[in-house]
Image (spheres, rainbow, N blue to C red):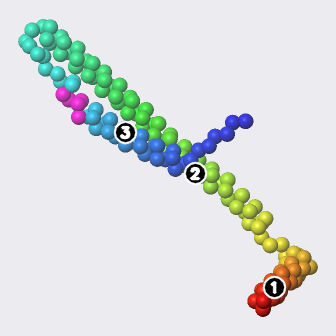
Amino acid sequence: MAFVLVAPEMVTAAASDLANIGSAINTANTAVAAPTAELLAAGTDEVSEAIASLFSGHALDYQSLGARMTAFHDQFVAALTAGGGLYSSAEAAAATPLQDLLNVVNAPHPSTVGAPADRRRRRRNRARAGRRSRWTALRQRR
């Protein structure tokens, strides 16, 4: 049987980090969109214009791919954030019944309070304390 150990706060932190990375990539893509798509030809000849057109086509393809990757990234971050929330709520839901059980186990049972065993334990502790004090008194007299 395989066990999965997940720290929800780490999943949430990872989702936040991924969102920041995605934001930085989107900013960079936006900054270079116009200069790369509107590339001017190096010269007035046909070859320069064809090369500029080829590079502009590649730039538009890159921007299209970047838009699809941004959409995927946003979905992935949303799924990761939702997963962290689900793990947190599952842990909270699992802890509640266990806490109730722990309270029942740790609660003193009414029939044992003041039982003979408790009286014997108190008597034994008082006797030990008395022996210690007598021993201390004997040692001080010497």
Q: What residue type is labelled 3?
A: Ile
Quadrant location of residue 66?
Answer: top left
In front of the other: 106 or 64: 106
**Which residue is under mark 2?**
88
Q: Earlier in the sequence, mark 1 or mark 2?
A: 2
* Residue 59 higher or lower than 22, as above or below: above
Give the farthest residue toward the bottom: 141
* Left/right of residue 136 with respect to residue 52 in the rendered view: right
Who's the residue at 87% across and 80% down the image?
124
> The C terminus is located in which quarter?
bottom right
Q: Earlier in the sequence, mark 3 or mark 1?
A: 3
Q: Can residue 138 be seen in this view?
A: yes
- SS at circle 3: helix
User: Which of the two discs, 1 and 2, sits closer to the camera?
Assistant: 1
**Was residue 32 drawn as part of the magenta stretch in this picture?**
yes
Q: How crowded is mark 3: few (under 14 residues within 10 Å), some or many (20 or more)?
A: few
Q: Which amino acid does label 2 sit on?
A: Ser
Secondary structure mostly seen in magenta is helix
Q: Which amino acid does label 1 sit on?
A: Trp
**Which residue is under mark 3?**
21
- SS at circle 2: helix
* Residue 12 higher or lower than 56, as above or below: below
Give, as a single range, the part of the protein colored magenta. Answer: 31-35
In front of the other: 24 or 67: 24
Disc 1 to disc 2, C-alpha distance: 58 Å
Residue 27 in percent (x, y) is at: 28, 38
